[in-house]
Image (cartoon, rainbow, N blue to C red):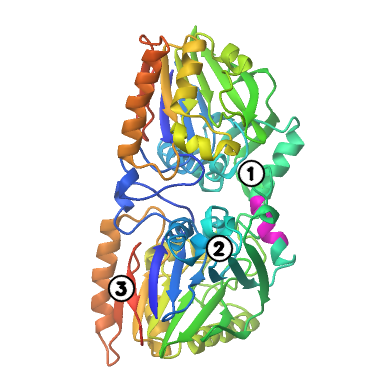
């Protein structure tokens, strides 16, 4: 599996000279499988750039297909959809797996984004590609890959984390993870989902002092992420979903602090990196 | 007054190295009459940084007041509002003006903050927010500033604003297509129509009336901020997207006798170097003719003093 980061920022895109190294686009990750399939996780503004990249290949000719896994429908996880060039090419085929418990509920939420008051597209029906919306269940197949999903707490709401497996290799995506109480232990359900992951991508929106004043927003610190990686015995931890106000220098210091957290918790053997737009990881 | 640009981009925010000089935030302009509360035009992602800056003033103590003029409610013109810090402080007063829609404006703006999309509902914001519906031609005052408006040629209709204060005039025209090829309304236009076919007489007349309204609104403006998302070539490929280009903007500015034209609402994929080239090329065009027209291209942080500052 090849994992590529197209958007690594939380809440709202953060353009500016201070965010160039890690990137200011909101959440979007692509997974190219060894068998040549494409799975996309989340549709933040990074999706536009992924789409422009895909247009050079099969998607530009209307012969592309991909699964899109959607963690939840807050803006920063869906706002790239209207700018995703491959959905305007007839012949392309997308299957979205997301929250909401029913395909109709999820489709209505995505349709609301295209409301003519807000979007010139007016409706999802103006997509030229096939755009099939399904409710994610706890275990399903997406582009022939085994995917498991777990609904975890995200402040006053919930989001889905995904475990994607191919030929014994495991990638886990857990963005927007945050319990509204202080000092909560790692969520056992999420620990189970992430167990033994080769790569665990985890929300590291905040440093602890910022989380303390914004607990109700439902995001993790690098300490929470380190504790999850250790509890789940992951091999590598990827930091993700940085606060919109954090500069590149801030993220550098979060990464150093996260390394120290991992070492303190007994995770000396766990690899660590801070996701950057454009970077690719191979599992 | 002083005019300051906080977001200059169209369609979608574009962080990254290629856009870092002009800036990647979507539309937001601050107009600051001398010694008075700020008037904000549009609430794209640029509004987030403006809000943080305002929190250093009276807004930080809950004593701030501002009026936000919304051109239209497409995402790139409203998506900064949930991240506007002054809205989260009790005591601040925020007046939002926008063109009348099918639903009450408050209901339109509430949708953006609703639970599947955003965790904090509009009704939970601490500041006092009030909504004012406008129709084209409405004239009103914000403090000493005289404000007027007219409609633009854009899907689901956008509004242009003229603000007159401190002996100077600033006019904001985004988003709009030229008034020559397509009359935008409520229909979704799937693909570019042929621009060679003659338009029906009533459409030609309606477009001419709309253009005359814009020229009148911009009459004698010290600064005309105009949607130039496209180059002329790009416009001919995508005339159905509802955006204009510098040739059209320059003609409008000349017809209105505007003194300075500001290229604005840059296309998301337009790099800084391309913006430099467009500005250099059109400075030559604007300098030609009997009527000199100063030309600038909007970038984040650009501040333009007008009249009595």
Is residue A56 or residue A267 the one in the foreground? A267
User: Residues under labels 3 and 1: Cα distance?
Assistant: 39 Å
Q: Which image quarter: residue B9?
A: bottom left
- Number of labels in the image equals 3
For discs 3 and 1, the disc positioned in front in the rendered view: 1
Q: CA distance from mark 2 to mark 3?
A: 36 Å
Q: Nearer the viewer, residue A260 or A278?
A: A260
Residue A173, horizontal then vertical, whole percent: 52, 24
Judging by the rendered image, the residue that carries numbered circle 1 is B119
Q: What segment is highlighted magenta in the picture?
A: B107-113
Choose mark 1 or mark 2, whichever is in front: 2
N-terminal label among 2 and 3? 2
Question: Mark 1, residues whose alpha carbon is within 10 Å: few (<14), some, or many (≥20)?
Answer: some
Mark toward the start of the polypeptide (1 vs 2): 2
Residue at 56% from the left image edge and 84% from the top image edge: B148
Tag 2 residue: B62
Residue behind mark 3: B296
């Amino acid at each position: 599996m090849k994992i590529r980061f197209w958007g690594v920022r939380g809440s709202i895109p953060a353009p500016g000279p201070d965010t160039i190294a890690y990137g200011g686009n909101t959440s979007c990750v692509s997974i190219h499988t060894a068998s040549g399939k494409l799975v996309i996780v989340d549709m933040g503004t990074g999706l536009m750039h992924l789409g422009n990249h895909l247009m050079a290949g099969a998607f530009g000719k209307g012969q592309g297909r991909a699964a899109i896994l959607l963690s939840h429908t807050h803006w920063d996880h869906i706002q790239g959809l209207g700018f995703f060039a491959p959905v305007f090419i007839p012949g392309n085929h997308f299957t979205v797996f997301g929250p909401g418990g029913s395909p109709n509920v999820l489709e209505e939420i995505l349709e609301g984004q295209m409301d003519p008051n807000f979007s010139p597209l007016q409706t999802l029906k103006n997509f030229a590609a096939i755009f099939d919306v399904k409710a994610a269940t706890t275990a399903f197949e997406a582009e022939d890959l085994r995917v498991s999903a777990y609904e975890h707490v995200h402040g006053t709401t919930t989001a889905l984390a995904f475990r994607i497996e191919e030929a014994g290799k495991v990638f886990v995506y857990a963005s927007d993870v945050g319990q509204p109480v202080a000092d909560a232990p790692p969520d056992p359900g999420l620990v189970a989902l992430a167990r033994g992951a080769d790569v665990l991508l985890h929300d590291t929106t905040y440093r602890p002092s910022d989380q303390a004043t914004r607990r109700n927003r439902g995001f993790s610190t690098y300490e929470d992420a380190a504790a999850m990686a250790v509890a789940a015995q992951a091999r590598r931890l990827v930091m993700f979903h940085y606060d919109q106000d954090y500069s590149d220098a801030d993220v550098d210091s979060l990464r150093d602090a996260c390394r120290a957290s991992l070492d303190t918790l007994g995770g000396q053997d766990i690899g660590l990196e801070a996701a950057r737009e454009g970077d690719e990881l191979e599992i | 007054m002083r005019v300051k640009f906080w977001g200059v981009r169209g369609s979608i925010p574009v962080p990254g190295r290629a856009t870092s000089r002009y800036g990647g935030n979507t539309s937001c302009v601050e107009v600051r009459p001398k010694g008075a509360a700020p008037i904000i035009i549009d609430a794209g992602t640029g509004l987030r940084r403006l809000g943080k800056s305002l929190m250093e003033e009276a807004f930080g103590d809950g004593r701030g007041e501002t009026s936000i003029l919304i051109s239209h409610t497409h995402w790139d013109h409203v998506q900064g509002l949930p991240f506007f810090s002054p809205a989260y402080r009790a005591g601040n007063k925020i007046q939002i003006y926008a063109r009348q829609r099918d639903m009450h404006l408050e209901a339109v703006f509430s949708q953006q903050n609703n639970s599947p999309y955003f965790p904090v509902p509009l009704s939970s914001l601490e500041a006092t927010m009030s909504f004012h519906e406008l129709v084209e031609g409405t004239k009103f005052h914000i403090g000493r500033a005289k404000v007027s408006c007219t409609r633009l040629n854009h899907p689901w209709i956008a509004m242009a604003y003229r603000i007159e204060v401190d002996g100077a005039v600033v006019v904001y025209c985004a988003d709009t297509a030229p008034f020559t090829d397509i009359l935008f309304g409520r229909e979704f236009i799937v693909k570019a129509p042929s621009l060679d076919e003659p338009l029906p007489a009533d459409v030609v007349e309606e477009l001419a009336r709309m253009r005359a309204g814009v020229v009148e609104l911009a009459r004698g403006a010290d600064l005309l901020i105009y949607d130039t998302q496209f180059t002329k070539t790009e416009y001919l490929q995508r005339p159905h997207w509802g955006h204009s280009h510098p040739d059209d903007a320059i003609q409008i500015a000349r017809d209105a006798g505007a003194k300075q034209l500001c290229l604005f609402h840059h296309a998301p994929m337009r790099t800084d170097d391309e913006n430099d080239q467009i500005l250099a090329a059109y400075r030559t065009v604007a300098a030609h003719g009997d009527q000199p027209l100063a030309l600038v291209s909007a970038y984040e942080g650009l501040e333009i003093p007008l009249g009595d500052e």
